[in-house]
Amino acid sequence: MLPLPYLRHHTEEAKARMARRNPLLCNLIDNILEADDRRRASQSHFDALKAQLNQISSQIGQLLKTGRSEEAEALRREVNLLKEQVREVESALKLAEQNLNELLTTTPNLPHPLVKAGRGSEDNELITSWGHIPEDDSDRLPHWELASQFGLIDFESGVKITGSGFPVYVNQGARLQRALINFFLDEAVKAGYTEYQPPHLVNADSGFGTGQLPDKDGQMYHVTADNLYLIPTAEVPLTNLYRDVILREEDLPIKLTAYTPCYRREAGSYGKDVRGLNRLHQFDKVEIVQITHPDRSYEALEEMLAHVSSLLQKLGLPYRIMRLCGGDMGFAAAMTYDFETYSAAQKRWLEVSSTSNFETFQAIRMKLRFKDRSGKTQVPHTLNGSALALPRIVASLLELYQQKDCILLPKVLHPYFGSEKITIT
């Protein structure tokens, strides 16, 4: 949620930042300020009427004490009229507060000034790249054929059991999943993150706190009987551990990590982008989250980028880092970097991590605060990143390391997988 004081005192700056998402969204800033003006006017009117009502009520008591009952009765009639006005103004105030809250909760975050204006992925900026892209090889098989050949993934049984986008990992395929999860978790713990095992279902308040609700309501699986939501990412339960919490400055930064399955409806997905492991409704991911002092959040973002880079380099996967343009960023993000690995058989880049700084946007929604050393209450910044999402990592690994009779594995995975390669069984 956007901070009202910033919008009021830096209106043109806020509009310039919002224009990086879409110039048409700049009107939202004016709408919020106008709604806040109406709320403030209603509040001022309500407070004035209540003060007048209290004053007259006090006068009535004094008149009755001195036996001036007729004058007291006249004031009682005035009080009754004032009470009716108070009810009307109170109703208008509640409506003004509702309108303001609706605007604030449905308006996206302001992009950081470094974020480029743009509408979609074609406007994203290449920041850096690493590794050697393999030469064109017509004999290289896509991961879905390798998964079938080596008996790693049963896509058909997943369709039978649940539906498209719910694969069944088998034997060495399941072991590779476990190896990657443990490798990613161990690396996160070495980097100073505390491991958690959070719930896979959250309530609506948690979805609201991190910005999934109401923005992505239709993209989340909803358990209607209990009004709970299957998590689209561990970011949601991890960050909400600190909802309605007041921290101390010395508690910061807080660094959390968790492995969870992730559930996403991905409505409208079709074509080559959904083949094999390219886009799933259920997938595994290790997430990293930080809660930081506002002055140090972009240092934390760079630290998180370095962490994700180190994972991909240890796996030997060629990758590139893209800074998303305003129009391609998520609802809650102020700045987002995507990591993409190269699919050697599909000959295209696959997103495997999204790492974002939300600044105060999530913290305001969650009522998360901290007391600085002077005792002043401030709002921290929150960040999160995939470190890493498994499906496209597996796709890239299989396609890059395939041999005629086996799939070699990066050295870092040997102790986790229990072997140097995947073989046909």
Image (cartoon, helix red, strand yellow):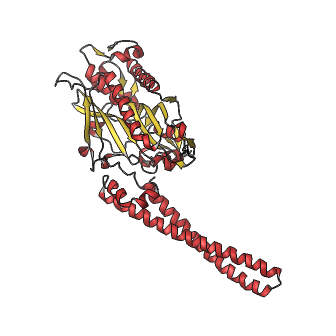
Q: Who's the residue at 21% across and 22% down the image?
A: 140
Residue 303 location, x and y as percent? 39, 33
Is residue 83 shown above or below 241? below
Q: Residue 27 vs residue 76: left or right?
A: left
Residue 85 location, x and y as percent? 61, 77
Residue 70 location, x and y as percent? 78, 87
Q: Residue 218 vs residue 127: left or right?
A: right
Q: Who's the residue at 59% across and 71% down the image?
A: 46
Residue at the far bottom in the pictured view: 70
Q: Quadrant of residue 298?
A: top left
Q: Who's the residue at 55% across and 43% down the image?
A: 373
Q: Nearer the viewer, residue 27 or 135?
A: 27
Is residue 186 shown above or below 219? above
Residue 392 location, x and y as percent? 33, 30
- Is residue 165 in sight in this rendering? no
- Is residue 314 in sight in this rendering? yes
Is residue 71 shown above or below 265? below
